[in-house]
Image (cartoon, rainbow, N blue to C red):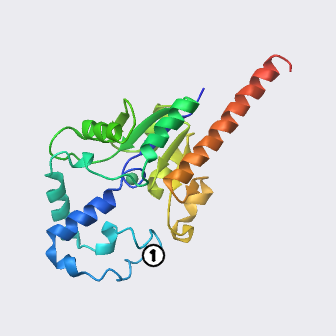
Amino acid sequence: MGLRVAIDLDGTVADLSRAMHDIAKKKFRKLQDADPAAPPAEGTEGALPVERPTLRDLELSASDLDRLWTHVLKQRNFWTTLDEMESGVIARIQQLADERRWEVLFITTRPLAAGATTQVQSQEWLAAKGFRHPSVYVVKGSRGRVATALDLDAVVDDRPENCLDVATESPAKALLVWPGSTDTLGPGVARHGVIVTPSIGAALDELVQMDRVKRGGVVRSIKRLFGK
Ligand SMILES: [Mg+2]
């Protein structure tokens, strides 16, 4: 039996930060002339390559961020408009699921935007990027409980706190997609066995490795059962 995997959307496969950055630059005109070489906010140094602008680069105040979210969520079917974090990654997940018989669930805490429900907008986005019949679960509360309830083998997420949830509250493996320096991660990540990967592509490679080990284990168990 193949892996049962849950994959987070924003920051993991969908580039929300880039979309928010672009909208913020249009909405807050004063940012148009912001110095692109300005140093990143504290704690974000090295988080992403410079050529990839992110919302954090703009260092918005809390009230500007609130206004931005209000503006964004009024855009009809906003969740269908994002780019992939890595071009072609959704099609690759589909291909792996087909080849290796994985069951894939996409999970998210996205707030409701104008238009269709979060679930339907997310499904439409995934389908447009190449995943047939995507399952999307809009999570309320702990991802660890979701991983336990759904008997998942692995959860892929871009937030350390979500990975720690999974690692401490469920038997599932947590894979953190973390392009920045691992020095900025708290000690809990290593202590609880979270697998840190620099990109979603690398996280998928890890899943393939886990899948091989799991299958190897099944073959060994069957051989033992038949005394081979
Ligand atoms: Mg995320």
Q: Position of residue 129 (x, y in %)?
A: 36, 42
Task: Tell me the quarter of the image containing the N terminus.
Answer: top right
How many numbered markers are drawn?
A: 1
Residue 28: x %, y % from top left: 16, 72
The outermost residue toward the top is 226
Q: Amino acid at mark 1?
A: Glu
Residue sitting nearer the eye, 78 or 4: 78
From this viewpoint, is residue 164 visible?
A: no
Where disc 1 sits, the SS reads loop
Q: Residue at x 33, y 73 (%)?
A: 57
Above or below for 83 versus 125: below
The answer to whether residue 184 is visible is: yes
Asked whether 112 or 34 is in front, the reply is 34
**Where residue 210 sits: x, y (%)?**
64, 41
Residue under pointer 1: 45
Residue nearest the observer in this picture, 35 or 225: 35
Residue 7: quarter of image:
top left
Depth order, front residue of 8/34: 34
Report the side of 83 relative to 48 (left or right): left
Rendered location of residue 39, percent (x, y): 38, 82
